[in-house]
C-alpha cells in the first residue's frame, strides 16, 4: 500500500518536471560543405602520399628498400597492398553528402562542382589501380541500400568519368566564391578549379587516346580552344595539398607518423640517382640526400641502390646503409605538399599531344617549359644549358618526353606507374630477385574484403581481370 501511494505521488508531480534533453550541445546538428570538403582532400592526400611511398615508388624504381627482402620491389604483392587505395571509396559518401547539401541550399553551386570533380579524380585512381571497379552503383548503400555494387568495366568507367568532367567544367560559377569557405587548395578561387578540371580531363583523355576514338577529337578541341578550356598555366595552379604542419595536419611521412628508423628503410633507386647524375640534374638534391658517410664533407656522394637485389647484397651494397642515399630530407618535413596534379605534367601532356599531331602546338617549346616548371616546383636550380645536354635535348621523339615526365612525376601518387604502363618508358630492368618473370605488375589485385562482402560481383570482375591476376593489363594499356 505504501508503494502504491509513492507511485501515485510521483505520477502527480511528473507532468510538472522538465523533460530531460540528452542532446550534446557541443555536437553540431547540421554541417555545411565547407566543413566536409577539407577533410576529404586531407584524407585523399594522405592516401596518395602513403601509396606513393609504399607501392608506386617501389614498383617503378623511384626507391627501393635497403634492409629487408621487401615484397613490392620484388613484385610479390601481399593482400595488405590492396587495401590503401580501395579505402578511397570511404570518401565517396562524404562527397555525395556535399552534393546533397548543395542541391538543397542557395549559392552552393561551386561546392557541388568541386565534389563532382574530386569524385572523378578518386575514381580515376581506383580504376587505374585495379581495372574494373564499382562505379555506376557505388556510393548507394544509404540512399538505395545497395551494399553489393556491380563492377563496371574500365572502359565504361572511363566513358563515365570523361563525360562527367566535360559536364562539370561548365557548371562552375566563377562569379561566385565558396559561401562557407573550406577550400584548402585554391582558397575559393573558382577559376583554378576550372583549370584543374580541364587538366584532369586532358590527363585521362591522353591515357585512353589510343583506345577511345573520340578522345583524340576531344583533345584537339580542348587544346585548340584554350579560352573555352583553360588549363593550368603556372605552378600556382598546381593541385597540391599543403599540410599546415600542426597535428594531425602533417605530411604522412614526417616523424610524427613515421619513425626515422622506418623512413630510412628506403633508399633512392640507382635508376633515379644514376640518371640524374648523368644529366647533372639538380633535382637529384631534392629527391635524395648524400650518403651518411659523406654528408657534411666537401665531397658529398649520392649513391642509389639497385632494385630487387638479394637481401644480403641489398644490405651490403656499396658498403652498407651509410653509403647509400636515402630519400631527400624534404620528405620528412611536416609541411611537404601532397601532389595530385601539376602544371609540369600538363605541359608534358601538351608536348606529347603536339608531337602526336593532335593539335598545332610547339612540342619542343612545351617540352622545355615542362622541364622548367618541374625544376621550379622542386626548388632546384636551373640553367638553360640543361636543355641542350645529351640525353635531354628534345629530338622530336616521344621517349624524351616520357623520361623527363617520369622524373617530374616523383611522388605524384600512383601516376608514375600509370605512365610507365601506358607508354612503356622509361626502360626499366627488373632486379635479379624479382618473382614476376621480370614484368612490372599491370594492376593491384582486389582487396580480400571484396571476396567476403561482395563475392558474386567480385568473382565476375576477377574473371575479367585474368582471375584477379596482377599481370592482367589495363584496358588502356598496349596489348
Image (tube, rainbow, N blue to C red):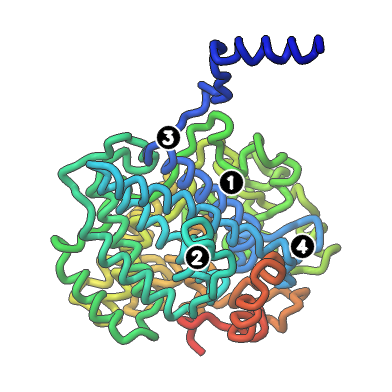
Q: Nearer the viewer, mark 1 or mark 3?
A: 3
**Other residues around mark 3 within 10 Å, as few (<14) / some (14–19) / many (≥20):** few
- Calculate the distance from the C-alpha at mark 2 to the C-alpha at mark 4: 34 Å
Residue ID at (53%, 62%)? 145
Q: Is residue 462 left or right of residue 142?
A: right
- Calculate the distance from the C-alpha at mark 4 to the C-alpha at mark 3: 46 Å
Residue ID at (32%, 42%)? 186
Residue ID at (13%, 60%)? 227
**Other residues around mark 2 within 10 Å, as few (<14) / some (14–19) / many (≥20):** some
Q: For numbered disc 4, what is the local secondary structure?
A: loop
User: Which numbered dot is residue 9?
Assistant: none
- Calculate the distance from the C-alpha at mark 3 to the C-alpha at mark 2: 25 Å
**Other residues around mark 4 within 10 Å, as few (<14) / some (14–19) / many (≥20):** some
- Calculate the distance from the C-alpha at mark 1 to the C-alpha at mark 4: 21 Å
Q: Quadrant of the N terminus?
A: top right
Residue ID at (36%, 51%)? 99
Say whether disc 1 or disc 4 marks the residue closer to the N-terminus: 4
Q: Which residue is mark 4?
A: 70
Give the quarter of the image for residue 228.
bottom left
Say whether disc 2 or disc 1 marks the residue closer to the N-terminus: 2
Q: Which residue is mark 3?
A: 30
Q: Is residue 306 visible?
A: no
User: Which numbered dot is residue 328?
Assistant: 1
Q: Nearer the viewer, mark 3 or mark 2?
A: 3
Q: For numbered disc 1, what is the local secondary structure?
A: loop
Q: Is residue 382 above or below residue 438?
A: above
Say whether disc 1 or disc 3 marks the residue closer to the N-terminus: 3
Q: Which residue is mark 2?
A: 138
Amino acid at each position: 500500500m505504501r508503494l502504491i501511494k509513492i507511485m501515485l505521488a510521483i505520477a502527480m508531480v511528473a507532468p510538472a518536471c522538465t523533460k530531460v534533453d540528452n542532446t550534446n550541445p557541443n555536437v553540431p546538428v547540421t554541417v555545411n560543405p565547407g566543413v566536409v570538403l577539407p577533410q576529404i582532400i586531407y584524407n585523399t592526400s594522405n592516401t596518395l602520399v602513403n601509396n606513393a611511398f609504399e607501392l608506386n615508388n617501389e614498383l617503378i624504381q623511384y626507391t627501393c628498400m635497403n634492409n629487408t627482402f621487401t615484397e613490392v620491389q620484388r613484385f610479390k604483392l601481399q593482400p595488405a597492398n590492396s587495401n590503401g587505395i580501395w579505402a578511397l571509396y570511404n570518401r565517396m559518401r562524404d562527397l555525395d553528402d556535399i552534393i546533397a547539401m548543395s542541391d538543397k541550399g542557395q549559392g552552393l553551386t561551386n561546392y557541388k562542382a568541386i565534389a563532382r570533380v574530386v569524385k572523378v579524380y578518386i575514381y580515376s585512381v581506383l580504376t587505374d589501380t585495379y581495372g574494373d571497379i564499382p562505379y555506376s552503383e557505388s556510393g548507394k548503400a544509404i540512399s538505395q541500400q545497395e551494399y553489393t555494387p556491380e563492377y563496371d568495366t574500365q572502359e565504361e568507367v572511363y566513358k563515365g568519368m570523361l563525360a562527367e568532367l566535360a559536364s562539370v567544367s561548365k557548371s562552375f560559377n566563377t562569379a561566385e566564391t565558396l559561401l562557407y569557405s573550406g577550400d584548402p587548395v585554391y582558397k575559393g578561387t573558382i577559376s583554378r578549379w576550372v583549370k584543374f578540371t580541364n587538366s584532369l580531363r586532358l590527363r585521362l583523355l591522353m591515357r585512353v587516346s589510343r583506345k577511345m576514338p573520340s578522345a583524340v577529337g576531344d583533345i584537339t578541341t580542348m587544346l585548340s580552344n584554350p579560352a573555352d578550356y583553360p588549363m593550368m598555366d603556372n605552378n600556382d595552379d598546381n593541385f597540391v595539398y599543403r599540410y599546415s604542419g600542426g597535428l594531425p595536419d602533417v605530411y604522412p611521412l614526417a616523424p610524427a607518423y613515421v619513425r626515422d628508423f622506418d623512413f630510412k628503410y628506403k633508399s633512392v633507386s640507382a635508376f633515379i640517382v644514376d640518371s640524374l647524375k648523368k644529366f647533372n640534374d639538380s633535382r637529384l638534391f631534392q629527391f635524395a640526400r648524400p650518403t651518411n658517410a659523406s654528408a657534411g664533407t666537401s665531397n658529398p656522394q649520392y649513391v642509389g641502390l639497385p632494385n630487387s637485389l638479394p637481401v644480403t647484397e641489398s644490405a651490403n651494397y656499396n658498403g652498407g646503409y651509410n653509403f647509400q642515399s636515402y630519400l631527400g630530407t624534404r620528405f620528412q618535413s611536416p609541411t611537404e605538399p601532397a601532389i595530385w596534379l601539376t602544371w609540369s605534367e600538363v605541359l608534358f601532356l601538351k608536348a606529347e599531344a603536339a608531337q602526336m599531331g593532335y593539335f598545332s602546338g610547339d612540342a619542343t617549346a612545351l617540352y622545355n617549359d615542362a622541364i622548367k616548371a618541374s625544376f621550379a616546383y622542386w626548388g632546384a636550380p636551373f640553367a638553360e644549358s640543361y636543355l641542350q645536354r645529351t640525353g635531354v635535348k628534345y629530338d622530336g621523339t616521344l621517349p624524351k618526353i616520357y623520361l623527363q615526365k617520369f622524373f617530374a612525376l616523383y611522388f605524384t601518387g600512383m601516376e608514375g606507374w600509370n605512365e610507365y604502363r601506358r607508354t612503356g618508358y622509361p626502360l626499366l630492368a627488373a632486379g635479379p630477385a624479382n618473382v614476376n618473370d621480370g614484368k612490372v605488375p599491370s594492376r593491384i589485385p582486389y582487396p580480400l574484403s571484396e571476396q567476403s562482402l561482395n563475392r558474386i560481383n567480385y568473382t565476375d570482375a576477377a574473371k575479367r581481370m585474368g582471375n584477379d591476376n596482377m599481370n592482367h593489363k589495363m584496358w588502356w594499356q598496349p596489348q
